[in-house]
Every structure is written in C-alpha cells, then in structure tokens.
Image (cartoon, rainbow, N blue to C red):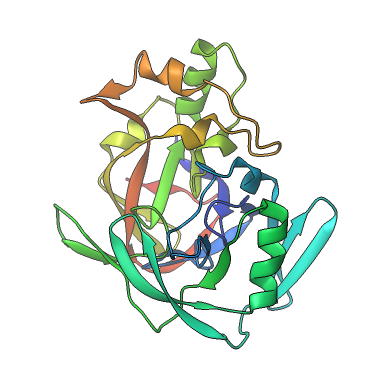
Amino acid sequence: MSIQVAELYVYPVKSLRGIKVGEAILEEEGLRYDRRWMITDPEGNFVTQREASEMAKFSCQIADNALQVSYEGETLSIPTTSKKSMVRSVQVWSSKLKAEEIDPAISHWFSERLNRNVHFVAKTTISKRSKRLFVPPYKTKLSLADGYPVLLLGTESVRVLNDKCPEDIPADRFRANVILETDAPHIEDEWGALTIGGSQLQVIKPCARCVMITIDQLSGERSKEPLRTLASYRKKRNKILFGANAICVKEGLIRVGDTVLV
C-alpha cells in the first residue's frame, strides 16, 4: 500500500479549532498560517485548552485576506495584514519572544467569551523563535506551536486506538497537521526523511501527549479517554506517545492525495 496524504489541517490560533484544507504550503515554521496567532494571559503566558477547554468551541477560517473566528453564532473578522497596535512580551513554555497585539477590542472580544482577561497576539517578524534539535540540522524555525513545526499522524494508529478504546475517538483530538493513510499502526514513529509533493520533511521523534487529547474538539467537554487507553500500550519512559513531530527540510506545496515517499 502506498502512503498518501488523507487530510490536512491548519490551526491559525493556538488551541482554537483547526481548519480542514485541501492543500497547504509548508514553510520552515510549519504550514502557512499555522499557529501564527495566540491568546495569552495579562502576563504574556500562553493560554490553551488545558486550562480553558472552552477554546475548543471557537472555529476559524481564512478567507478574503482575513482570519475569521466564530463562537456561538458570532463571527469576528481579523485582517491578516492588519496594523498591530502594541508589542507584548509573551512566553510559550520556555520560549520568550515579542508578539504584537492587533487591537485591544479584539482582545476584549475573546476576554468576554472566555470569561477571563486575555490578549490576542500575532507572531510577526518583530521576533524570531527557534527550536534546537538533537539531530541534523540541529535547529529549526518555529511558530507559536508547542514544540515542533509539524505533527504527523497515521490513520492506522487511530484505528487501532479505537479498537481498544471504550469511547469513539476522532482524529481531531490529536490536532495533527498531516494525517496520512497508512497500513500499519505507528509507522510514523519510524520514518526519517519524507517527500510530499514539492516539500520535504524530517521526522524528529514520536509526539508526547497531554490532557489536551481528552477534550472534545466540538463541545469542549473533558474525558479520561484516550489517555487512559493509550497509557496501556503507548507509554514509554513515563510519556504517552501518539503521532510524530516533524520539521520542514524543503518548503513546498502539499495536497490531499499526494503520495508520500519515505
């Protein structure tokens, strides 16, 4: 069986719902528009579904040069090229960088709906973020993602999980960028260099998972699954592994249906 791209997802705002797309441009920081915006607390610390599961109920689209965020029937349109109003110091795990708040009114819109004081910021050229690697090329650029530019996931890994799990777990729980049609579970862990369309990626390591995958990506409701089931067969050195972290080696276009050369 040849490996093909089954689905592609872009997550413009860190921890909000993703966008299913037919094609995407892979850049060194990840898929274009992926994790380029973020919600922070007043001190600049990133806010995610881990502490605000309500964020799963915000959906995103990118159209007409604007990021459109919807919540319970309301839609906010944010121009992707809008002038930024204020530079803010922000932090994603150990990474400290400068980001730009687009408009205090936009931050207020999110604050009201999340019932907490937050700022809505964009990653721009004002500040760079990089990730050190333990294998060549030893360094890569990074967006506002947790740790790596791209997350890969095989369909067979999801199927085997659902065979074992008492709850039906959709693939969107894992917030992968590239879902690949595979014929064996967890083979994405073992890959090295990949060519997809005009792009090339390098798998760095299996992805360690957290409580994020227990949150329903439509309702925001929490469960014990699939972490409990995964812990029974995917736990290694006290980490639960599912999917694979990858970096961009060569920028290019990726389309659903593309054959993957491993």
Q: Is residue 127 or residue 116 the one in the foreground?
A: 116
In percent of width and height, residue 156 lies at: 47, 26
Q: Is residue 10 above or below residue 37?
A: above
Work out whether residue 256 can be spotted.
no
Quarter of the figure with the C terminus = top left
- Name the residue located 50 percent from the left edge and 65 percent from the top edge: 42
- Name the residue located 74 percent from the left edge and 72 percent from the top edge: 77
In percent of width and height, residue 33 lies at: 54, 67
Q: Is residue 261 above or below residue 124?
A: above
Q: Is residue 228 or residue 19 the one in the foreground?
A: 228
Q: Is residue 155 above or below residue 65?
A: above
Q: Is residue 239 left or right of residue 180?
A: left
Q: Is residue 212 above or below residue 45?
A: above
In percent of width and height, residue 90 lies at: 40, 68
The residue sitting at the right extreme is 73
Quarter of the figure with the N terminus = top left
Using the rendered view, name the quadrant where residue 11 is placed: bottom right
In percent of width and height, residue 215 lies at: 58, 33
Total residue callouts? 0
Q: Is residue 259 or residue 168 the one in the foreground?
A: 168
Q: Is residue 111 or residue 244 the one in the foreground?
A: 111
Work out whether residue 93 can be spotted.
yes
- Name the residue located 40 percent from the left edge and 25 percent from the top edge: 185
Using the rendered view, name the quadrant where residue 107 is placed: bottom right
Q: Is residue 219 left or right of residue 80?
A: right
Q: Is residue 227 left or right of residue 233?
A: right
Q: Is residue 22 left or right of residue 90?
A: right
